[in-house]
Amino acid sequence: MKPRVIANYMGWNFVRKLGSYTDKRFRDIELKFNQHFNKQETGVDLRFRDIELKFNQHFNKQETGVDLRGTCMDSISSQLPYAVSRLYIDKHFTQNDKQEASNLVNDVKKAYYELIEEYDWLDENIKNKYLTKLNATTFNVGYPDWILNNTDLDNYYKLIQRVNLKKSFEAMIYLQTNSVARNMRSIRQPVDTIYE
């Protein structure tokens, strides 16, 4: 493949990913492109999409039909998932809630174990394989405990410095850059299960 094609592909992916964080002019172009592209792909006039856009225009008081609040929240959630999860946990969960869910999962695991033991139509070799697999299965319930520890949470995001939230485009570029840097450093490294 020609280097120019690869460069264009990378450039357009960059524009597609970060275009929503630019100004209204760009969002208008993106909206028109998406409407045209969707109509061309499906051969259908997307009337329901137009109704949704009108609703978003009215609800968000935006002329583009783009749900800016939702776009911002989706972006923050995808860039800072553990930080957003921590805010949600602090507001909506107690330690008891997680313990109850863990107990339920353990009860289900125990019930499966007992069912497999009771199956007399399974030969012992197959039974042992099922039980070994069941015992080796790890269940992640709710959220990882480490995100309740401020030091661990700060360490996870230590590469991210203060960003100016009034400059959303610059903030998103910075967050994306840090995300890529964290991923690149993890290549060929053992998985640190504290963050799983």
Image: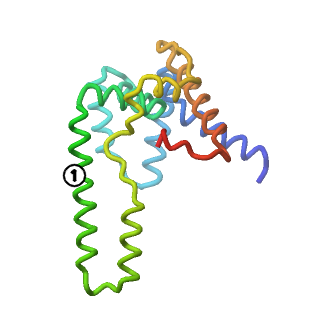
Q: How many marks?
A: 1
Looking at the picture, does residue 45 appear above or below residue 172? below
| Quadrant of the image containing the N terminus | bottom right
**Residue located 37% across and 36% down the image:** 145
Q: What percent of the width, then of the height, locates residue 174?
A: 58, 23
Q: What percent of the width, then of the height, locates residue 32?
A: 46, 35
In the image: residue 56, left or right of residue 10: left
Query: Is residue 66 visible from the viewing direction of this image?
Result: no
* Quarter residue 12 falls in: top right
Q: What percent of the width, then of the height, locates residue 72?
A: 41, 26
Q: Nearer the viewer, residue 43 or 182?
A: 182
Q: What colour scheme has been applied to the protein in the rendered image?
A: rainbow
**Residue located 37% across and 73% down the image:** 130
Looking at the picture, does residue 122 appear above or below residue 26? below
Q: Nearer the viewer, residue 57 or 102?
A: 102
**Residue located 53% across and 14% down the image:** 162
In the image: residue 185, left or right of residue 43: right
**Residue located 33% across and 25% down the image:** 87
Is disc 1 placed on a helix, strand or loop?
helix
Q: Nearer the viewer, residue 24 or 154?
A: 154
Query: Which residue carries the number 1 mark?
Result: 104
